[in-house]
Amino acid sequence: MIKESMTREGRIRAAVNLEVPDRVPIAPLIGQFALRHQGMPQSEGYRNPSRVIQVLMDTFDELGGYDAQVQADFIWPSSSWRISSAPTPMHVAGRGAPEDSPIQAAEREIMAVEDYDTIINRGWNGFLEEFLPRVTGRPLEKIDASQKRQLEIYMDDAKTWKEHGVPVLFGASTCSCTMILSLCRSLIQFTLDLHRIPDKVEAAMNAMVDDLIDNVKNDVKATGIPWVFFPLERGSGFYYPMKIFERFGFPYLKKMVDAFAAEGFMNMLHFDTDWTLNLPYLKDLPHGKCICELDSTTDIFKAKEILKGHMCIMGDVPASKLALGTPEDVTEYCEKLIDIVGKDGGFILSTGCECPIDAKFENVKAMVDTAKNHLPAH
Amino acid sequence: MSELADVIAELNEDEAKRLVREEIDAGVEPMSIVDECRQGMDIVGERYKKKEYFLSELIVSGEIFKEAMAVVEPLLKGGKEADPLSKMVLGTVKGDIHNIGKDIVGMLLTAAGFEVYDLGIDVEPSIFVDKLTETGAPILGMSGLLTPSFKSMKETVKAVEEAGLRDKVKIIIGGGIMTEQVREYVGADACTNDASEGVDICKKFAKEGK
């Protein structure tokens, strides 16, 4: 075990500030895995969200502790119905899905092509005002009240983590314009929109981005946690050529990140799918104000080459390795990450995307232990 | 290369629609129009392999092909192709409701000449087996995005074995997190996280099966 000389928070801060901490911090994205491990059906976590924190804490203790809890519990905190994400219908355990099944998006076309005009005319929040009740079948007042109840639980849970000396790295969340429109239209329809009506899509993005920024600022004000989580999947070079990213992706992402950085918020860019081709653009985002969090499909070693000294990198133990591999496989991979990506600081070891619900406990433990036992090779 | 194949390769949707209509009106054999469309799709596939095109271009070209087939297919004898490249059963496995990858690969397989039996999402192993038995399809494609899908895929392979079909059916698995380790665990013949590569593997399977 490496002799530690920093607090958890200090270790995380050093990594995001691109400094060399006493050891590489470890901050896995643990949620559904903890419930499965502790024998609580996922449905119970959604029925009684206030029970989730204890299960997460028990798992944290069993793993011997780690350096940060990314999300305090299962809740995506928001201060009102003005969400900076898509109201995609979800397949939730106990609500139509089996009791212990993972949550999944039931993506379908919930937004019509005509709705672009409403966004252009009324902005994102103006559109949400009529779109949310239409999609969810619930009036805004009920959605608002539900968000506020959830926010209270989230803040209590974040406080509990803080009292245990564990920083929480999730104070608000926002999808990119591409991600929101793609989820609302469906990936295939949105891709056809980019081909058929690019000017209209662009006009909608121009009309929505400021509302997304304002919503996040309000949410951070409510939680008091200056960390913004960006779930980014749609829009990568896996899907689109760089000319699409240059017009519809990066300008809006940069506008949002710049606005949040100016407020002193840290931006956790949660990249799912392969963003390797997009990595050079990230050098135009503000220095030391973002985390490039990868899911194992983007080349993390290339990310280190390109973003070294500019942006902290986080990831990316593959889900398949955690679910099917052995502790030796996991340790070997984590050591490689620490040696190469962790060299000269600016790295947080983590799961590639969320820890799989059916990960083997001994594999997750091996990941956590490797961060505590292995220093980057010189 | 025909003009129709060229405009499809260039993703010119309006021109493709116009040319298909023009060729039908001129009395061109419907199967010949399908072949021209397929040539256009082949060029798109080649450009994708050369990294000149991305998944988005595969999606757009697949949509153009689908629109063309909606017009041409009713004119084919019996309303469908007489001699598909191969039959294939496709679906997202039990416990997983992700459809995007499956839909894209299904669209590309159809455009490549496969007769695809798409069973949808959250498909039980027995449903896959029933469809393989009913159609005699020699290829099974299973899709999944979450790690629990690995177990469902393995159970489906076992069900195919128990039905005595394993030596008659080639099995490919696909999804964002598929790896060789997953393929081995599942007992599939191939795995991919690339829709275009998936089509190539199925073409190879179809060729081996003939």
Image: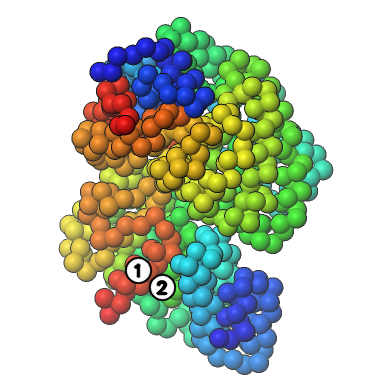
Mark 1 residue crowding within 10 angstroms, few (<14) / some (14–19) / many (20+): many
Can you see residue A44? no
Q: Position of residue B119 (x, y in %)?
A: 40, 58
On the question of residue B57 being in view, the answer is: yes
Q: Quadrant of the C terminus of chain A?
A: top left
| Circle number at residue B114 | 2
Report in which chain the residue with disc 2 lies.
B
Q: Residue furthest right?
A: A121
| Occupied quadrant, residue A326 | top left
Q: Nearer the viewer, mark 1 or mark 2?
A: 1
User: What residue sits 53% from the left and 66% below the top?
Assistant: B52
* Amino acid type for the residue under numbered disc 1: Cys
Amino acid carrying mark 2 in the image: Phe
Picture coordinates of residue A356 (x, y %)? 36, 35
Q: Which mark is residue B202?
A: 1
**Marks 1/2: CA–CA distance:** 9 Å
Q: Name the residue at 62% across, 84% down.
A: B3
Q: Are marks 1 and 2 in contact (CB under 8 Å)?
A: yes
Relative to residue B175, is residue A304 depicted above or below? above
Residue B169 position in % (x across, y down): 25, 66
Total number of numbered discs in the rendering: 2
Left or right, A142 with reference to B180? right
Look at the picture and state if A213 lies above or below B181.
above
Percent x, y for residue B143?
A: 38, 54
> Which numbered tag is attached to residue A369?
none
> Which residue sits at x=49%, y=43%?
A306
- Using the rendered view, name the quadrant where residue B66 is placed: bottom right
Image height of A124 relative to B160, above or below:
above
Question: Residue, x 55% and y 26% (percent of image)?
Answer: A76
* Secondary structure of the residue carrying numbered label 1: helix
Of helix, strand and loop, which one carries label 2? strand
